Amino acid sequence: MVQHISNNRTNKQITYGDIARITYASCLNFFNNNNMFDPHPLGIYYVIDYHWIKRTNNDEYQHQNVWAGSIKAGSAATTPKGMYYGGGSIITRNTSYIQKLHTNLVCDKNGDERVLIKCCYRKTANFDKKRLGFFLLQPKEETFITGSKHLFVYYIVITPKPGLFPVK
């Protein structure tokens, strides 16, 4: 979806609205109704983090982190049109930081770009593992480099089509 969402437009660059729509569409296999929205009856919500990097020289990368999900600190979405999204400006990072994000993000040549897509579920205040069918086992919780905690994390690193990123 990331690679093809802007195919029918003149300006191919992805927008924050595109990111929100991609996030919503990608979670429909689990959340096939409004359970992903407030009041989150399963005690979890869905978020995708997108980390775009571009190598500018041997030890310097441009990095932009954007995200979308069905909740934001202090408030929660109640419909697909209410999907939250956000992100930061482009920051200069060194190779060691990029390796901590994901080793496959490290590029071979100047000008190369990669995108880390991290899909995950996060717990809400009313999380109860039994609602997800975990009666004996505790779902594994993973802490990302940013300090946020996630359940059921999936990573994919892609080389984006030229002109898609950074998100505007």
Image (spheres, rainbow, N blue to C red):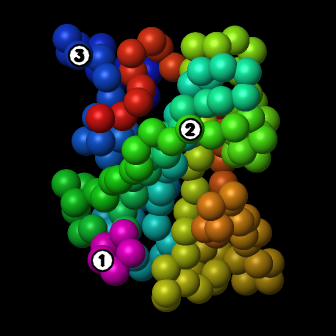
Q: How many marks?
A: 3
At label 3, the amino acid type is Asn
Q: Which residue is mark 2?
A: 92
Q: Measured from the top left, where is residue 48 in percent x and y?
A: 49, 50
> Which residue is depicted at the point 38% across and 75% down?
73
Q: Which residues are magenta?
A: 72-76
Magenta segment includes 7: no
Q: Is residue 165 left or right of residue 143?
A: left
At label 1, the amino acid type is Ser
Q: Quadrant of residue 35?
A: bottom left
Q: Which residue is mark 3?
A: 11
Report the magenta stretch's main SS: strand
Q: Mark 2–mark 1 contact, CB under 8 Å?
A: no
Whichever of labels 2 and 1 marks the residue nearer the N terminus, that label is 1
Q: Which residue is mark 1?
A: 75
Q: Nearer the viewer, mark 2 or mark 3?
A: 2
